[in-house]
């Protein structure tokens, strides 16, 4: 290859892709210092994989399909589940300290909508931090990887042959540089930062969707956002998480009078699918009855040792989870939609790939199964690296890229508040239309900043989906359509008038 492989983003998917791309030279861009600014380090539950004696890839795939509310690509689910055990072992081999039993087997947690205990964990809630630390050590030791800390991708460089030629990136001093690459891999994570209440870094604002769409990629199902039911409600932005593993250990959800409300909502009670629990918690808070995660009996005095991250977060907000129920609220947690790719992460734009949360491989459908996200980063990152190594060499002829306008902080905060209010756990046409009007007004004032374009994808997808399914719940369309379909949007669908003008100019 004449140019390196360029990877944008340094969470689990970006780092694993970089490692697996060896021996090809890789340039890895991370907008902050390596280890900061990605959701991976904050993940608590662990990695779902068929590792137990009572489990199989087929069963894991079946649970993934069931959780996804009719829109999971079954081949993708089987690809994910079949590779799960070997990817966890590979991570363990590079130093990720998953808990093992004295007998040698894996210590596994059970999370919502899994038929069996299947989540490989580290010290209760330390999986993300432990995995990230192991990956960073491996990446720093790898000779084929050049890490550029604090380099932010602003736009993709178009290739004159309608492909991608790399990125236009800003260095830590604010200078712009075109970086050419034969293959560019987007691994920029979530859109959670578009929400006022989120468990993801606020800098995660759907950048991959916007950059990829500018080169013609399709954005699939942007409306499908997963809300985690138990973010700790202590007024922090981003909101700390109280892992689902706590409910797996027996913690229950109660109102302010101590009444346990989930058994009235679903037969699986606290372990019902995540969207069901999120809506119930949202309804409790709206009604004023309150929602609290009560782990006093299930965990109690063992909290500091068994769930150190949750314990520290609670204590920082003045809640002692050994003696007090934890106030909780749903928060934007995961984006099922994103840049449409095949099962190797290829976007359809020559030279452009997407992996991890920013990609839509079809594996999550309308609702991701808990703890499938870290696994997705491993499996599809590995597959993308393999496919890129097999791909014919590309020589790029770089065209011009423009830096997008920036959105002032106050406008971003207005956008985030309105997205939480109108494209949150519960949606309807009136709220989504008001949100759309606001986005247009902000765009007229500040230009098409990436956060606004990403918000347009989300809102347009949510308005178009006139049904309720998985993470997308419309009060004006409460039923699930008999046949589910995917939303597929291109940039021209967001700006039809401009697209018409361009067409007329070309004719
Ligand atoms: C959790 O620990 O509850 C989050 C796990 C996930 O989002 O998959």
Image (tube, rainbow, N blue to C red):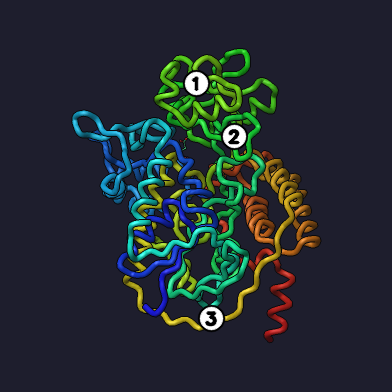
Q: Quadrant of the C terminus?
A: bottom right
**In the visual, does 201 lie left or right of 382?**
right
- Which percent across, then down, holds residue 207? 58, 59
Tag on residue 330? 2
**Most foreground residue, 324 or 471:** 324
Query: How many neighbours does mark 1 have within 10 angstroms: few (below 14), some (14-19), or many (20 or more)?
Result: many
- Which percent across, then down, holds residue 312? 51, 28
Residue at (69% x, 73% y) in the render = 499
| Callout 2: SS | strand
Tag on residue 405? none
- Cα–Cα gap, marks 3 and 1: 56 Å
Q: Given this view, does label 2 or label 3 mark the residue nearer the observer?
A: 3
- Which percent across, then down, holds residue 92? 28, 44
Q: Say if disc 3 is inside 8 Å of ligand 1.
A: no
Residue at (51% x, 53% y) in the render = 33
| Callout 3: SS | loop
């Amino acid at each position: 290859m004449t140019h390196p492989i360029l990877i944008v983003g340094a969470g689990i998917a970006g780092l694993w892709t970089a490692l697996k791309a060896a021996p090809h030279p890789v340039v890895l861009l991370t907008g902050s210092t390596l280890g900061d600014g990605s959701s991976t380090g904050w993940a608590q539950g662990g990695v779902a994989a068929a590792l137990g004696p009572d489990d199989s890839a087929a069963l894991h795939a079946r649970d993934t399909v069931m959780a996804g509310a009719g829109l999971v690509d079954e081949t993708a689910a089987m690809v994910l589940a079949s590779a799960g055990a070997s990817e966890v072992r590979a991570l363990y081999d590079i130093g990720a300290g998953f808990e093992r039993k004295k007998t040698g087997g894996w210590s596994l947690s059970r999370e919502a909508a899994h038929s069996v205990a299947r989540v490989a964990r580290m010290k209760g809630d330390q999986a993300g931090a432990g995995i990230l630390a192991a990956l960073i050590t491996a990446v720093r030791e790898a000779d084929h990887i050049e890490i550029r800390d604090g380099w932010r991708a602003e736009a993709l460089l178009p290739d004159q042959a309608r492909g991608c030629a790399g990125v236009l990136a800003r260095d830590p001093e604010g200078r712009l540089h075109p970086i050419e690459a034969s293959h560019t891999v987007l691994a920029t994570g979530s859109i959670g930062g578009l929400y006022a209440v989120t468990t993801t870094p606020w800098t995660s604002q759907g950048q991959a969707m916007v950059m990829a769409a500018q080169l013609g990629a399709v954005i699939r199902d942007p409306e499908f956002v997963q809300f985690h039911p138990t973010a700790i409600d202590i007024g922090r932005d981003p909101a700390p998480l109280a892992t689902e593993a706590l409910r797996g250990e027996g913690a229950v959800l109660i109102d302010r009078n101590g009444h346990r409300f989930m058994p009235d909502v679903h037969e699986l009670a606290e372990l019902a699918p995540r969207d069901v629990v999120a809506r119930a918690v949202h309804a409790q808070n709206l009604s004023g009855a309150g929602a609290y995660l009560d782990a006093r009996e299930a965990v109690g005095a063992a909290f500091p040792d068994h769930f150190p991250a949750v314990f520290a977060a609670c204590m920082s907000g003045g809640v002692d989870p050994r003696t007090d129920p934890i106030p909780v609220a749903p928060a934007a947690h995961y984006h099922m939609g994103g840049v449409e790719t095949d099962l190797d992460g290829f976007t359809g734009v020559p030279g452009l790939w997407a992996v991890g949360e920013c990609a839509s491989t079809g594996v999550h459908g309308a609702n991701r199964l808990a703890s499938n996200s870290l696994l997705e980063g491993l499996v599809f990152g590995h597959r993308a690296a393999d496919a890129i190594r097999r791909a014919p060499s590309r020589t790029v002829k770089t065209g011009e890229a423009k830096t997008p306008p920036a959105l002032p902080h106050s406008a971003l905060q207005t956008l985030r508040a309105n997205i939480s209010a109108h494209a949150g756990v519960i949606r309807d046409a009136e709220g989504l239309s008001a949100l759309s009007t606001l986005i247009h007004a902000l765009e007229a004032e500040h230009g098409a900043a990436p956060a606004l374009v990403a918000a347009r994808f989300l809102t347009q997808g949510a308005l178009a989906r006139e049904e309720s399914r998985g993470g997308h719940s419309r009060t004006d369309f409460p039923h699930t359509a008999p046949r589910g379909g995917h939303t597929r949007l291109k940039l021209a669908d967001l700006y039809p008038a401009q697209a018409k003008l361009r067409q007329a100019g070309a004719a």
